[in-house]
Image: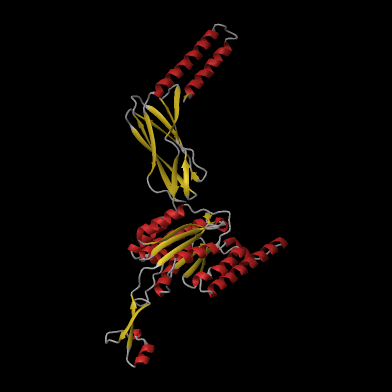
């Protein structure tokens, strides 16, 4: 599309003054009309010439787009025409993207190429559609501009925040995990699974003596344990309505996804296999435990599409699916919310069915507003009702947590900032005590 430039607009304003002056000097009428015709004809002809100029525009992203991380969009402009060109760009950002500005302008000599960098931050995981780049090209002090869109609509997949994985790996290699807040635990013994009983040898550790077998046989007997093998770690992520509550600049689900990705990476580094179940009113994704980078990549790809749904989380559906798929003892991390009394009560009824065979850790983010209201005072009558309601909700949550603990379920509550550290330390503690 061809549009007139500002030079044309100023010329038309001047010629409009000439036409107005023709009321006093009639001879200026033909001057004004001829000038308007000449300007418009020149504009049309220049627009036709601009349409034949070869200006190429392309864009790309230099790395994987992550939620809440500034990302650079690179736009390449190449002038393949024989004249100097002024090229202006405009990028219309999606609603789930934050960016400062989106316009740029460069002047290119014949055969010259330039690159423009635009920075944006995605605020939602999953696919985000980016509209084509709007391009405007003209000659310096020209009468016309040519406008078009470069490329089509591109769909970009926004991944969870992976910065913590790189930080964890860097500190692990430098043996500086304590600076990250992670405390490594010493392993107890060589294993807890019984392999066999045999006669005591002089170089055996006296702690491995089986005193009951020794008493029966009247001779020292040593217990031989199997060395620890890879375990299955299953991440169960709740995508119900309670996970959509805002916290820490995002949602509860966003913070749970970040912690789950870091836990998957740490577990594979410990030699464990990692699996994933994503559920709302039903289990809509189930990935069997896999070891190595393949397992972490599958977890990341599965959590990219996780989003809060306007439904109640179905713990019976989750329990049924886990019991059907996991036949041997598994370490299960259940990311959910305990802030709803009805849902936490249902959780306390059904999740203990899993703890009979598996080791279950329920991970929940605390509601800072609820805790602040419950612990604070009241200045008027309306605040009294708010405080009493908050304290009742907090008491019900604590009661359900105690019920889960009595059933052998580990309950881990943390705020948004400390969730990742607590969950990694909990995992390492379980490994060190060999509770599996």
Name the one closer to the observer, 268 or 394: 268
**How many marks can you see?**
0
Name the one closer to the observer, 58 or 127: 127
Up-down: is 94 above or below 322? above
Question: Measured from the top left, where is residue 409 in percent x and y?
Answer: 51, 71
Query: Is any atom of residue 420 visible in this view?
Result: no
- Furthest residue to the front? 324
Left or right of 80 on screen, residue 366: right
Question: Which picture quadrant has residue 25?
Answer: top right
Q: Residue at x 47, y 65 (%)?
A: 324
Up-down: is 20 above or below 314? above
Q: Residue at x 54, y 6 (%)?
A: 27
- Furthest residue to the top? 27
Name the one closer to the observer, 71 or 411: 411
Q: Residue at x 51, y 57 (%)?
A: 253
Query: Is any atom of residue 100 visible in this view?
Result: yes
Name the one closer to the observer, 300 or 29: 300
Q: Quadrant of the C terminus?
A: bottom left
Left or right of 241 on screen, residue 298: left
Left or right of 158 on screen, residue 17: right
Question: Measured from the top left, where is residue 202 in percent x and y?
Answer: 27, 87
Question: Measured from the top left, where is residue 63 in percent x and y?
Answer: 38, 47
Up-down: is 41 above or below 376? above
């Amino acid at each position: 599309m061809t549009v007139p430039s500002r030079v044309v607009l100023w010329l038309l304003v001047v010629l409009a003054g000439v036409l107005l002056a023709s009321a006093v000097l009639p001879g200026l009428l033909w001057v004004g009309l001829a000038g308007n015709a000449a300007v418009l004809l020149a504009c049309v002809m220049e627009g036709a010439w601009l349409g034949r100029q070869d200006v190429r525009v392309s864009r790309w992203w230099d790395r994987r787009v992550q939620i809440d991380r500034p990302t650079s969009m690179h736009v390449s402009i190449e002038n393949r025409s024989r004249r100097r060109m002024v090229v202006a760009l405009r990028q219309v950002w999606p609603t789930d993207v934050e960016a400062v500005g989106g316009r740029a302008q460069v002047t290119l000599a014949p055969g010259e190429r330039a690159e423009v960098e635009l920075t944006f931050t995605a605020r939602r995981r999953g696919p985000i559609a980016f509209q084509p780049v709007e391009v405007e090209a003209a000659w310096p002090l020209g009468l016309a501009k040519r406008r078009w869109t470069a490329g089509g609509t591109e769909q970009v997949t926004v991944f969870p925040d992976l910065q913590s994985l790189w930080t964890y790996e860097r500190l692990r290699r430098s043996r500086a995990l304590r600076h990250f807040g992670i405390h490594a635990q010493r392993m107890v013994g060589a294993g807890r699974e019984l392999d066999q009983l045999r006669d005591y040898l002089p170089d055996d550790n006296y702690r491995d003596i089986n005193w009951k077998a020794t008493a029966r046989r009247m001779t020292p007997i040593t217990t031989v344990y199997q060395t620890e093998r890879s375990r299955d770690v299953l991440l169960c992520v709740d995508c119900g309505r309670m996970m959509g509550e805002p916290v820490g600049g995002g949602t509860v689900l966003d913070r749970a996804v970040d912690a789950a990705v870091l836990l998957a990476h740490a577990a594979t580094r410990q030699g464990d296999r990692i699996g994933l179940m994503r559920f709302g009113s039903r289990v809509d994704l189930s990935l069997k435990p896999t070891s190595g980078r393949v397992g972490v990549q599958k977890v990341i790809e599965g959590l990219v599409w996780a989003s809060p749904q306007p439904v109640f989380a179905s713990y019976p559906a989750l329990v049924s699916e886990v019991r059907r798929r996991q036949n041997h003892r598994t370490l299960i991390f259940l990311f959910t919310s305990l802030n709803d009394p009805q849902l936490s009560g249902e959780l306390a009824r059904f999740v203990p069915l899993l703890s009979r065979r598996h080791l279950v850790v329920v991970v929940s983010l605390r509601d800072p507003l609820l805790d602040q209201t419950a612990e604070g005072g009241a200045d008027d009558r309306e605040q009294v009702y708010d405080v009493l309601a908050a304290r009742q909700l907090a008491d019900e949550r604590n009661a359900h947590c105690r019920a889960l603990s009595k059933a052998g379920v580990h309950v881990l509550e943390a705020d948004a900032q400390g969730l990742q550290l607590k969950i990694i330390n909990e995992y390492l503690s379980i490994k060190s005590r060999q509770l599996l």
